[in-house]
Image: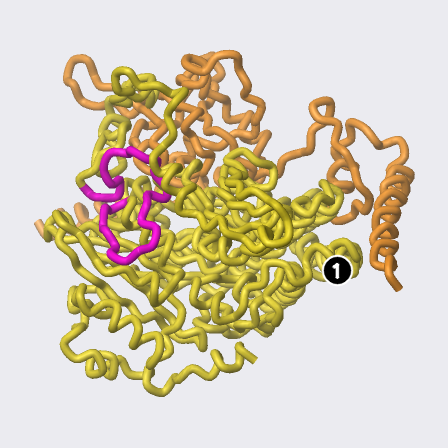
Chain colours: A yellow, B orange
Amino acid sequence: MAAQEIGAAPSEQTAVADPIVSRFEGALRPDERKGYEGYIVAAEGLPEVATGLRDELGYDYLSSVTGVDYLDGGQLEVVYHAYQTSGGPALNLKVQVDRENPVLPSLVSVYPGADFQEREIFDMYGVRFEGHPNLRRILMWDGFAGHPLRKDWREAYYEEENKPFDSRWPTGDVRRSEAANRFGKNVIYPAGFDFENWTPESDESLYASLNKVGSNGKTLQTDSLVVNMGPQHPSTHGVFRMVVALDGETITDLQPVMGYLHRSHEKIGERNTFLQNMPYTDRLDYLSSMGNNLGYALAVEKLMGVQVPERAEYLRVLMAELTRVSNHMWAIGFLLNDMGAFQTPALYAIRARELILDVFEATAGSRMMCNYMRFGGVARDLPETLRDENTLDFISDLAHNRLPAAIDELDRFLTGNEIVRARCIGVGVLPAEKAIAYSAAGPLLRASGVPYDLRRAEPYSIYDRLDFKVCTRSNGDVYDRYVIRIDEMRESVKICQQALRDMPAKGEIFSRKPQYNVRVPEGESYGRVENPKGELGYYVVSTGKTNPYRYHVRAPSFINLTVLGEMCKGHKVADAVVILGSIDIVLGEVDR
Amino acid sequence: MYGTGMLRGMGVTIKHLVDAFVDDLRFLGQRYYNAGSLNARQGTRGRGVFTVQYPEEKLPVPERFRFIPFLLYEANADGSTDHRCTSCGICAKVCPPQCIWIERSSDPETGRPIPTPTRFFIDIDICMNCGYCAEYCPFDAIKMDHDYELASYERIEAHIFDKDRLDKPVEYYAGIRPTEYVDEENARAEEDAKKAARKAAAAKKKSVGADSKAAAA
């Protein structure tokens, strides 16, 4: 029901861009900088404009919020990308604010999905969002000095603004990076610092901020407890912490704490040249690196205006869909691990995944860190042989026999299982309206009944010619999120079969002369793909040089966590583990 | 009926168990130390669960597998070696984590650069195995290796590979990447032939030009 209401969002008003200017007379103006698009909004008018866009024009889905530091202009800019869940292009809003005293109204009350993203901007740029319920650092630790993504902030290993560094050639005098760290072998602690009796301020305020009132108190004498699950906990899929307030065994509140794996992906990305970022994107969601490559390639290709040859497009789609199958296999296997079915389902699930990784390894040279796509094509064509077989035979055997059989087997093994059903049905329910409001993406959104898939909503590459359906489920509980992954794998296999059938047997795989240092025209671009975990977006700003001025990743794992606390409330501790498993996060992408 | 789902699941488990033994029978006598049967059982032809007895036996890696770069040299008949590297620095410039350090040689008298590296380092702790150096090297002088067993007891010295450690003969490269090697050699031969033809054409044109000039005079 809800899905249909959302599907019926108005579309006739948004076909032309002008109505937006006329509707919000005086509050916004078109962005007229070269290579830029969208509108610049005055800071005071932001909440009204956002509310109007959401309620009147149907821009109900806030995809990405990020900052840019325009050091020369003395301004910070916050960039919002909003979409209609009925499909269509982005609405790109920008707010400019003084670098010295950056204060903006928070949009959490309009789009709750802005929560973590605004915290990230506060952390990285120091923009204070007034009205934000929980404005604390999110990726950096308590007491960290400065805001790392500001252009004048320099890391401990700082060498030069941009790569390549002059020290490497022609007078390469090798030294270990530790030698360049200005903090030496350790950080410096203040005199008299006592580890034993120190609790980080943010932790205390976090514990205090949790809601500890449950309903158990009336019937059962229980104490309210705050429990830290993680950072090192087998259920958290990596170094990730859930601070849980408990009433007995019932969760009254939950806050995710992250950043333990933060490695300044975006700061490194701004030091790198455009091409150098490609292998780094592998390390975001390391279970689906082909998808990461594709998103980044699309964002930069949009700026460069290059075409991709036909065969390369098919290879890209083939690889991206194989990645989706392999990712969902892993997601399902680990969901069962989280339910307590240790390793057996996980190993059966990844048995077929192993074959997919063989394809990646033989084609790209690495099982997981594929680094396969380039701007204007792919790095290499398929090899002749794979495990003593013809490669095309191998892949087509995979797509027609092995993968469908493996999916059917998982289905037979798990879907009807009474324990799985008892643990999953009705747990962690996420209604459609909430899923949209919290910017949930991917299987999480579609399991709640919102038929939003970028491959259909805003087709990229060759998805508009392929025949597949957007899977949805209606209940939005853990079980639906499990079943939808099975459905999506089946659709992906179908796409692989079509790609194998239609792919030109021979042809160019790269449209340009391979160049190790590309210049990218001035401007901004937001490239997004439907990654297995949800919408993966890259916001890239170029100033016409060989390195990106701004490189931002809209990480689906990170933003999907915004709604975790909401989904867990009222459930038992053991359910929190399963709900987290059903979101399917990868910490490499959460923390970046 | 309650419990059928679980029974069906157990059927899947039993099938895996049986498949493993059926596969063992199918490959009877080829269980160990046999690259062909490893490939078959790990590929699409294998059905059951199978364990590779690492490190006693290892799965063959595909030709394009990439792990840590190495430098190529050609050994001459008299025992001297020719390095392909001209120290142009493209690998150091394209390297995403900047783990390559090259010192270019220069003539001690004139100070002019000589196209060969004096020293060449790769910090393998930093190398991310992306393969860009091999991909963009215009002289096919740096390639990605297949040797992935690099554990050592010490990292400060042992993990910075110098030129001696990185150097490997062209024959080694031809051994681990046969098709790429052949493709590159063919492309080079073609390029050389083209260059020779162009040179010959230019020489001819020159001589023709000189002739006509002489005739005009």
- The residue located at (59%, 44%) in the rendering is A222
User: Where is mark 1, residue-wise?
Assistant: A415
Q: Position of residue A390 (x, y in %)?
A: 68, 50
Question: Which quadrant, please, contains the C terminus of chain A?
Answer: top left
* Callout 1 amino acid: Thr
Up-down relation of residue A436 to residue A117 (above or below) = below
Q: Main SS of the magenta segment?
A: loop
Q: Nearer the viewer, residue A120 or A165?
A: A120
Question: Could you say which quadrant of the image residue A205 lies in?
Answer: top left
Question: Per the image, is A143 magenta?
Answer: yes
The chain letter for the residue carrying disc 1 is A
Give the left or right position of residue A32, taking residue A489 as reference: left
Question: Which quadrant, please, contains the N terminus of chain A?
Answer: bottom right
- The residue located at (32%, 45%) in the rendering is A136
* Label 1: how many Cα within 10 Å (few below 14, some 14–19, many 20+): many
Give the extent of the magenta segment: A124-151
Q: Is residue A589 visible?
A: no
- Name the secondary structure under disc 1: helix
Up-down relation of residue A332 to residue A473 (above or below) = above
Pick out the residue farthest to the bottom.
A12
Question: Per the image, is A516 magenta?
Answer: no
Q: Position of residue A471 (x, y in %)?
A: 60, 70
Give the left or right position of residue A354, taking residue A556 as reference: right
Give the left or right position of residue B113, taking residue A5 as reference: left
Q: Position of residue A128 (x, y in %)?
A: 23, 51
Q: Nearer the viewer, residue A545 or B18?
A: B18
